[in-house]
Amino acid sequence: MGRKVLVLAELKDNKLRNVSFEAIAAAKTIAEDGEVVSLLLGESVESLANELIQYGADRVVVVENDKLAQYNSDGYSQAVLAVIKQEDPEAIVFGHTALGKDLSPKVASKLDSGLISDVVNVEVTGGNVVFTRPIYSGKAFEKKIVTDGLIFATVRPNNIAALEKDESRSGDVSKVDVDIKDLRTIIKEVVKKTSEGVDLSEAKVVVAGGRGLKSAENFKMLEELADVLGGAVGASRGACDAGYCDYSLQIGQTGKVVTPDLYIAIGISGAIQHLAGMSNSKVIVAINKDPEANIFKVADYGIVGDLFEVVPQLTEEFKKL
Ligand code: FAD
């Protein structure tokens, strides 16, 4: 029988973000032998539709409109609602990203539906779609099912593996016109603050620094290590508050939540609010001169030492690999 599932694709710099493919994988599980329809919104994006099919979408619906060139919740919610009306899916999946976190509750509430956010696993048991999500800042997990009405879910990046890309897959790509009106916000310009490079919330390796770095100048040493490992730089709030780096790098309860394969915490004490953003990383390495630092309680590997000695040595060793 199966279900029809709609998945919102997300773009960055006119490329599909990896979370779009992970959301398709989640949608495949929800759909069982039903249909996964990917929804692609933007100004001129149709050329990206095929990649969504290669990652497992059965079909792609494209809405192109100059009012969708930049994300704005009014325009995007109108487009998503129009496609939901047309497609009549049983479930809608978003990435648990800044965009998904803003858009999904708006769309769900317009349809009087609930929303299961920050999903890290999906399975179907006994005919029910069971969503797993972290609670209490990642200390425990709860399982949820939707008993009535539409299923809305957001999936946390880096948790549900995307399917292998299959270039032989094909599927229908159709365009839908949506009359986008009454925008209360017009985005005139986007000024990029962070440097180009690996997206922090999707990075497989995160090198994060804390107040132990002692200055903005010293903080730059993390970039070198992150570059060698093909990772992204993150930070504790302590480092952001001290002005060592931009707040866009903050990881934790009031920052970004990351779940990379490898998280290296450097000069970070491991306050509970920081752990909330990184404790579900697959492997955690902590470098701290204080053997009692809380970060060692969640670390798989700990290096007790002076970061100013350890980090340059590590960087040099990784360069040799
Ligand atoms: P510190 O606690 O000062 O730790 C610095 C560490 O560096 C120490 O463990 C020290 O031993 C080590 N160190 C110093 N020198 C060296 C050296 N040479 N070599 C090796 N190690 C060294 N924090 C977050 O990170 N993210 C959040 O989202 C967040 N949200 C918050 C929300 C609320 C409501 C509140 C109240 C707080 C929040 N905080 C958050 C702040 C949090 O409580 C901590 O204050 C903060 O995480 C501390 O940052 P830190 O570990 O870099 O600094």
Image: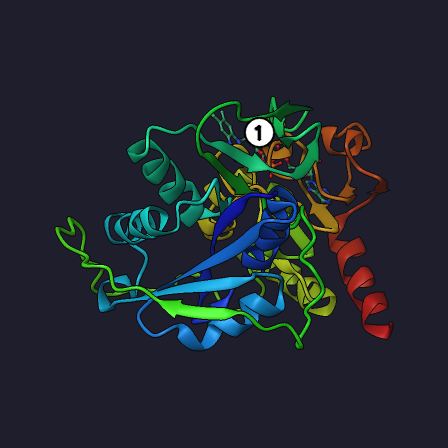
Q: Quadrant of the N terminus?
A: top right
Position of 279 compared to 247: left or right? right
Q: Quadrant of the C terminus?
A: bottom right
Q: Relative to 30, is 215 above or below?
A: below
Q: Is residue 9 visible?
A: no
Q: Residue at point 73% right, 49% down? A: 264
Residue in the foreground of this view, choosing between 11 and 169: 169
- Residue identified by numbered label 1: 273
Q: Relative to 248, is 109 above or below?
A: above
Q: Residue at point 72% right, 65% down? A: 164
Q: Relative to 156, is 294 above or below?
A: above
Give amino acid for label 1.
Gln
Q: How many marks?
A: 1
Classify the position of ligand 1 by quadrant: top left, top right, bottom left or bottom right: top right
The image shows residue 89 at horizontal and vertical percentages of 44, 45
Residue in the foreground of this view, choosing between 213 and 149: 149
Q: Residues within 10 Å of mark 1 (few under 14, many from 20)?
A: some
The image shows residue 223 at horizontal and vertical percentages of 63, 63
Q: Residue at point 67% right, 57% down? A: 162
Position of 55 compared to 85: left or right? right
Position of 177 compared to 116: left or right? left
The image shows residue 307 at horizontal and vertical percentages of 75, 50
